[in-house]
Image (cartoon, grey):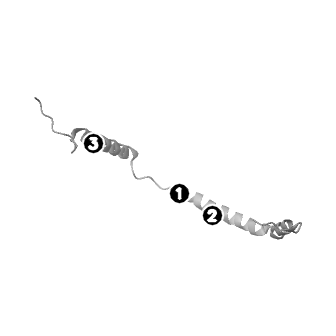
């Protein structure tokens, strides 16, 4: 990284890139009003109805977990040797 030997060169660069005030307050106000108008329209829409029953979903999930557990415990794995009683 090189530095500029001229004193105050960095300050001039920063001053040149500084924002000029005021920063368009009418444009910001218009954008704020447009945003709130859009939010008011979204809030006015009715909430969608839920058609799925949560109890049914939880019951199906529990039944699936139980079936997988039983299948995993009862089915032999291919790597197990045959058991012989002597």
Q: Position of residue 22 (x, y in %)?
A: 83, 67
- How far apart, in angstroms, are the residues tagged by discs 1 and 3? 40 Å
Asked whether the residues under the numbered discs 1 and 2 touch, taking CB atoms below 8 Å apart as contact, a structural biologist would say no
Q: Residue at x 25, y 38 (%)?
A: 73
Residue 19, quarter of picture: bottom right
Which of the two labelled residues, at mark 1 and mark 2, occupies the earlier sequence position?
Answer: 2
* Residue 80 in the image: above or below residue 22: above
Horizontal side, residue 49 vs residue 77: left or right: right
Q: Position of residue 20 (x, y in %)?
A: 83, 69
* Residue 15 in the image: above or below residue 44: below
Q: Secondary structure at mark 2?
A: helix
- How far apart, in angstroms, are the residues tagged by discs 2 and 3? 49 Å
- According to the picture, the residue beneath numbered tag 3 turns out to be 67
- According to the picture, the residue beneath numbered tag 2 turns out to be 38
- As rendered, which of 76 and 54 lies closer to the eye? 76
* Residue 63 in the image: above or below residue 5: above
Q: Label 1 neighbourhood size at 10 Å, few (<14), some (14-19), many (20+)? A: few
């Amino acid at each position: 990284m090189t530095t500029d030997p001229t004193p105050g060169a960095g300050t001039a660069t920063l001053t040149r890139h500084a924002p000029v005030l005021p920063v368009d307050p009418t444009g910001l106000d218009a954008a704020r009003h447009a945003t709130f108008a859009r939010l008011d329209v979204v809030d006015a829409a009715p909430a969608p109805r839920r058609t799925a029953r949560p109890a049914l979903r939880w019951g199906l999930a529990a039944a699936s977990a139980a079936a997988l557990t039983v299948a995993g415990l009862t089915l032999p794995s291919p790597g197990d040797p045959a058991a012989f009683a002597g």
